[in-house]
Amino acid sequence: MPEITSLARMEDLQRLMQFVVSQAQSAHLPARRQREIELAVEEVLVNIFSYAYPDAEGRVSIACQAEDERLTIEIRDVGVPFNILEIPNPDVGAGLSERQVGGLGAFFVRKMADEARYRREGDQNVLVLIFDQRGHDAPHPK
Amino acid sequence: MEIENTGKDDGRFMVAVRGRMDAVTAPEFEKRILDWIDSGETHIILDLGELEYISSAGLRSILTIAKNLRGQQGSLVLCALRDTVKEVFEISGFSTIIPVCESTEAALKET
């Protein structure tokens, strides 16, 4: 299974994203779905960069399994125990003055992935995201 | 990501943003716009017709700018949102708190 590992820092974001995009292409997912995948993965990675390793540098790894029109992504880090899927949704109805950006990343992960699962495995956070081909005009069972 | 002042029309300062606004590039975008605001431009039209991608980092910068301009009785309009960018704005609720137009021409027609 193709995998990339890197220091968990912003300087490596674009390189990690390029890997994910190439895997999405291998799964023959359309360009629009590729961008949605990038969005979800970026939000996960930025959370790891910001919070996983408060005291020292750490690493992150991404493994992808590309099938026909389905991409499974597994993101692992050995930072502080953290499940992005537990972060509550932001108030998307708030007016401009009250509006905050906190929680938006987690919100996008849940919205963009067809399936999302977290588990703690030893000292690792393991987040699995699954992306299928989706009809954007069809009602989505979520 | 490219950021370019493409003109000024009727006091409205037009900026085109091209490429991707992600966690790496959003801070630069925010700084450039805030610099223009500091120099007196408080009515801004953002042409996003060539923006391919935006993440929550980009939304954070846009929110900062929108709140800043509102605090100065200024204005911010976003134009020509594409595909995933439009989807991101809609599902996050940002398109109901920041004016969105189909094109810069449409934005300029509105007072």
Image (cartoon, rainbow, N blue to C red):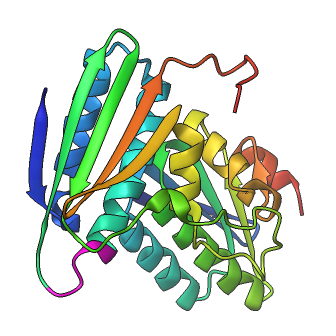
Is B91 above or below relative to B56? above
Front residue of this view, candidates A141 and B54: A141
Residue B102 in picture, x, y percent from top left: 75, 41
Q: The magenta stretch spans which residues?
A: A51-55
Taking the spot 76% from the left edge, 21% from the top edge, the residue there is A139
Taking the spot 78% from the left edge, 82% from the top edge, the residue there is A97
Residue A104 in picture, x, y percent from top left: 58, 62
Whether residue B5 is visible to the viewer of this picture, yes or no, is no
Which quarter shows the N terminus of chain A? Answer: top left
Taking the spot 53% from the left edge, 31% from the top edge, the residue there is A114
- Hey, which residue is sitting farthest front in the picture? A122
Is A53 above or below relative to A26? below
Does residue A86 appear left or right of residue B63 in this picture?
Answer: left
Whether residue B89 is visible to the viewer of this picture, yes or no, is yes
Taking the spot 60% from the left edge, 72% from the top edge, the residue there is A101
Which quarter shows the C terminus of chain A? Answer: top right
> What kind of secondary structure does the magenta stretch mostly adopt?
loop
Q: Quadrant of residue A38?
A: top left
Does residue A3 appear left or right of residue A21 in this picture?
Answer: left
Count of numbered labels shown in the rendering = 0
Front residue of this view, candidates B110 and B96: B96
- Hey, which residue is sitting farthest top in the picture? A68
Is A142 above or below relative to B30? above
Q: Quadrant of residue B27?
A: bottom left
Residue B39 in picture, x, y percent from top left: 54, 89
- Hey, which residue is sitting farthest right in the picture? B111
Residue A60 falls within the magenta-colored stretch: no
